[in-house]
Image (spheres, rainbow, N blue to C red):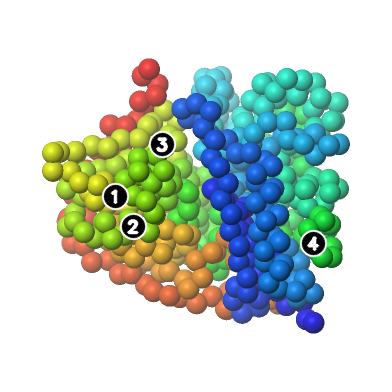
């Protein structure tokens, strides 16, 4: 049997997915499992690392029951990026819950580093801002708060990594502790110029470099999965952060290509080619590394996208299922003057305000749940507009369309409103699982399932293009109201 398919693991923020994808980019099998979100106190977000591993195992078992392992050329892995796990090298046991990228517990640490005048150093070396979003201050927190962790780390007994590293450790029976530059470049510890861990940045955060994973390319023969759930060993052929994977999956290989992933958060990414580009309000990051040849990107990360709808469902009970949101939004002609700023984990790009908090404004006696749901969907589109405008201003680029993916991109109301909010065409592909597709593509290049990146991209198919229909004057009026609402939510947590 010809090995013409890739098993892609998409390790997300609210759940894990496994897909088997063939050369024509058809999904032969798919499995998904959610895992719990843990909120120890306001602003803190954690995951149980064992739940992440168990749901990964369950997804693997399900797809391997549907597709013969002989047909699979290897495994591609993409993951939520800045979430970190600390574990014992010998036992493979996590020493603490994973600290999630959304967690705000290191706000004071970031502020202290800024007040010490260190942000320009981190900015110049890493392309990142000092924000609790990134892994470095999370690692420092774990070393400072897990009893004995710092001493054990100094002795080389512990390992730390993002979710790709954690799952690879499990898949390989503890034999591999690795990550790729796309994930490493989200830690505040990776130097974009030297393309390696930066000893000086590690020292500033008090992190022993020996704790960190070995850097490997995003595509290649990286490790071997030997976990007992596999019928036979499989090579791990790609590691890539989820948003960079979506960029690859969308075929965004040049500087004219902009994509937005509508997942838990919103992640707009523009490929900037073989050299990193600085941005005043956005992030410079590694897109991927192909056998030592890196590509770079500029990214705008918005912390709460689809999670706003999940919050309406799980915390407020306004809806029972996320799919209800489209029908409710269409049931009213507008938001009834309601504006929702979903700063539930602070504000990311382009504001970078860790003390911002969520805001519902414009409520009246006539406000119905449909107005609130519509305002939440509109907020997703306005946050995207914020980042697109920042890209235009910072980089001087012409943006002619937006390519979209992720679960919320299925929502036709949201996609039409996104086109209206931007005044740009919005192009939705047939296959919305672009993160998994990108991981499969990078793995498939290593396995020669696809001859090259262009061969891979040639199989991408467009489902629908949404054209802007809103009057430009009305668009700008509504956007001004959005910006006023954003200003009213900023700095709130810092007032208490």
Q: According to the image, label 2 marks what residue?
A: 324
Counting residues from the N terminus, which is met first, the one under dot 4 or under dot 1? 4
Q: Position of residue 107 (x, y in %)?
A: 51, 26
Q: Nearer the viewer, residue 373 or 135?
A: 373
Is residue 184 toward the left or the right of residue 483 in the image? Answer: right
**Marked residue nearer the N-terminal end (3 or 4):** 4
| In this view, 375 is above or below 144 | below
Q: What element carries label 1?
A: helix
Q: Residues within 10 Å of mark 4 (few under 14, many from 20)?
A: some
CB within 8 Å, label 2 to label 1: yes
Residue at the location (79% across, 27% down)?
A: 153
**Label 2 near label 3: C-beta < 8 Å?**
no
Q: Name the residue under label 3.
A: 344
Judged from the image, the secondary structure of the residue bearing numbered disc 3 is loop
Tag in front: 3 or 2: 2
Q: Is residue 19 above or below residue 208?
A: below
Image marks 3 and 1: residues in contact by CB distance under 8 Å: no
Task: Determine the CA span between mark 4 and mark 1.
Answer: 43 Å
Task: Answer with left or right where residue 58 lies relative to residue 2.
Answer: left
Mark 4 touches mark 1? (CB < 8 Å): no
Element on which disc 4 rests: loop
Earlier-in-chain disc, 3 versus 1: 3
Give the CA distance from mark 3 to mark 1: 16 Å
Of marks 3 and 2, which one's residue comes earlier in the chain? 2
Residues marked 2 and 4 touching at CB (< 8 Å): no
The residue indicated by pointer 4 is 230
């Amino acid at each position: 049997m010809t090995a013409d398919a890739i098993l892609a693991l998409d390790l997300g923020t609210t759940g894990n997915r496994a897909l088997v994808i063939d050369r024509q980019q058809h999904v032969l099998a798919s499995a998904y499992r959610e895992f719990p979100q843990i909120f120890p106190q306001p602003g803190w977000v954690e995951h149980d690392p064992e739940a992440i591993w168990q749901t990964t195992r369950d997804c693997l078992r399900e797809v391997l029951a549907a597709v013969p392992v002989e047909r699979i050329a290897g495994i591609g892995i993409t993951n939520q990026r800045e979430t970190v796990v600390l574990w014992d090298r010998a036992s493979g046991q996590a020493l603490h819950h994973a600290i999630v990228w959304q967690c705000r517990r290191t706000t004071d640490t970031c502020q202290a580093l800024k007040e010490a005048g260190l942000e320009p150093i981190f900015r110049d070396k890493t392309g990142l801002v000092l924000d609790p979003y990134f892994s470095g201050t999370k690692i420092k927190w774990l070393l400072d708060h897990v009893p004995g962790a710092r001493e054990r780390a100094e002795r080389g007994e512990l390992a730390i990594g993002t979710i790709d590293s954690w799952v690879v450790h499990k898949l390989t029976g503890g034999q591999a502790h690795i990550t790729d530059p796309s994930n490493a470049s989200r830690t505040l510890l990776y130097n974009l110029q030297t393309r390696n861990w930066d000893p000086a940045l590690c020292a500033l955060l008090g992190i022993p470099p020996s704790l960190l994973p070995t850097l490997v390319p995003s595509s290649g023969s990286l490790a071997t999965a030997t976990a007992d759930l596999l019928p036979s060993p499989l090579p791990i052929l790609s590691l890539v952060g989820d948003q960079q994977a979506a960029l690859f999956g969308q075929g965004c290989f040049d500087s004219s290509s902009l994509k937005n992933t509508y997942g838990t958060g919103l992640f707009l990414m523009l490929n900037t080619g073989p050299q990193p580009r600085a941005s005043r309000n956005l992030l410079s990051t590694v897109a991927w590394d192909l056998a030592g040849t890196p590509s770079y990107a500029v990214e705008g990360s918005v912390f709460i996208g689809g999670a706003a709808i999940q919050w309406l469902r799980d915390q407020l009970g306004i809806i029972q299922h996320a799919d209800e949101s489209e029908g409710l939004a269409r049931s009213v002609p507008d938001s009834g003057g309601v504006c929702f700023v979903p700063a539930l984990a602070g504000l990311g790009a382009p504001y970078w305000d860790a003390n911002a908090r969520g805001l519902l404004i414009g409520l009246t006696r006539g406000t119905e749940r449909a107005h609130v749901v519509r305002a939440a969907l509109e907020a997703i589109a306005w946050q995207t507009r914020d980042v697109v405008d920042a890209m235009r201003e910072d980089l001087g680029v012409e943006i002619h369309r937006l390519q979209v993916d992720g679960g919320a991109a299925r929502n036709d109301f949201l996609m039409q409103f996104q086109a209206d909010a931007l005044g740009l065409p919005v192009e939705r592909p047939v296959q919305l699982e672009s993160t998994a597709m990108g991981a499969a593509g990078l793995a498939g290049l290593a396995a020669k399932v696809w001859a090259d990146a262009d061969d891979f991209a040639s199989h991408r198919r467009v489902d629908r293009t949404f054209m802007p229909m809103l009057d430009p004057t009305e668009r700008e009026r509504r956007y001004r109201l959005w910006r006023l609402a954003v200003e009213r939510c900023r700095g709130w947590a810092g007032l208490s």
